[in-house]
Image (cartoon, rainbow, N blue to C red):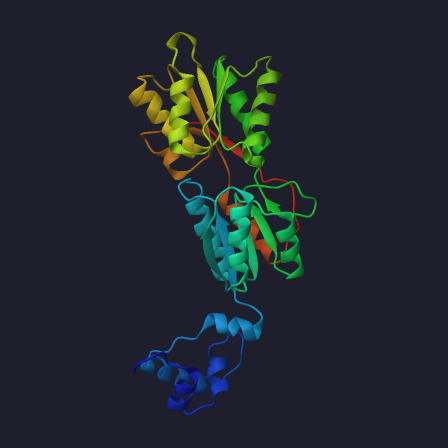
Amino acid sequence: MEGKVTSSQVAERAGVSRSAVSRVFTPGASASAETVAKVRQAAEELGYRPNALARSLLTGSSKMIGLVVSYLDNHFYPPLIEKLSRALQEEGYHILMFLAGNDGPEADAVVEDILDYQVDGLVLASVGLSSDLAKRCAVMDVPVVLLNRHMGASDEVAVISDSRAGGRLAAEHLIARGARRIAHIAGWEEASTQREREAGFIDGLRAAGLSLFAREVGNFVAEQAKAAARTMFADPENSPDAVFVANDFMALVVLDTLRYELGLSVPDDVRVVGFDNVPAAAFPAYQLTTIAQDPDAMAARTMACLMGREAPESPLPVRLIERGST
């Protein structure tokens, strides 16, 4: 059959009303087993697929959650998004994913586009949202959850880990391993995760009577992290004996640069700690000591907040995983 098959054609083939076809393809609607069998057989024969977007206009629910991610090259996000997607599917929802930069205007423009799809909720992963657009979402009754970042607003719902505690754990671990010339390679400095990880790290150093030996910025970008490592270790006579890197994505690049470009031994010449515990951190080639976030707990809490089952709580706990890099 040429052209798009309509519900009217399915109804005619099945010998039922158009409303019966609609009930069969509307989750939760009632229809007899006989009607369901006839409609589904007719739909299969004709190659019919229901229009979910059109149905959302009638039901007021698209069963879709909009997800905005700033970048996917960070190895932490694919497993987290997979866990969140599976949790949503168990509740009958699906993810509509968009990419946006860190800057506010671009993120706002992407969220504006997503709202046109009549989404039932929004998850912003390491992406901010202007106060005006947040108010619009509230008026539209679209719940918004910030994932792995917060903006500091009193009424925001943010699912985050205890980055400050994680930074302190990193400092304490490196000090316990005998490091004294301890450095930091920072991520994007506008991110709450970066600010809090560094603040906790400096707290840990100060508690031991130490200060930051050196600091460079990698901006959560591979090439910039590599450049930061080159600069930090340019002088072999006056270089750090340990470095805390703001996330594992950069830390893996730093490890490769130290070992294969600068000829340093890890951990004999320099110890390295990351943050996130991405899958590659455990690979034999890296064996990266890191501060672990819990993606299962983050996905579960995000789901609970979207469904209105949970109010914002304190940050999720983190833990140190010691491996060969220290």
For image coordinates 69% across by 48% down, the residue present is 155
Q: Where's residue 53, x and y in %?
A: 48, 70
Instruction: Looking at this view, name the residue that lies furthest to the right.
Output: 154
Residue reaching furthest to the bottom: 15
For the C terminus, the image quarter is: top left
Is 84 on the left-hand or right-hand side of 1?
right
- In the rendered image of this protein, does residue 307 appear above or below residue 186? below
- Pick the residue in front: 126 or 321: 126
Residue drawn at x 47%, y 58% as measured from the top left = 95
Q: Position of residue 196 (x, y in %)?
A: 59, 31
The spot of residue 120 in percent (x, y) is: 56, 62
Coordinates of residue 4 in the picture (x, y in percent): 36, 78
Residue 326 appears in the picture as rendered? no
Image point (61%, 47%), residue name: 130
Q: Is residue 215 visible?
A: yes
Count of marks placed on residues: 0
Q: Is residue 89 above or below residue 225?
A: below
Residue located at (41% from left, 29% from top) = 224
Residue 42 occupies quadrant? bottom left
Nearer-the-camera pick, 109 or 206: 109
Instruction: Name the image quarter holding the N terminus.
Output: bottom left
Q: Quadrant of residue 270?
A: top left
Q: Quadrant of residue 166?
A: top right
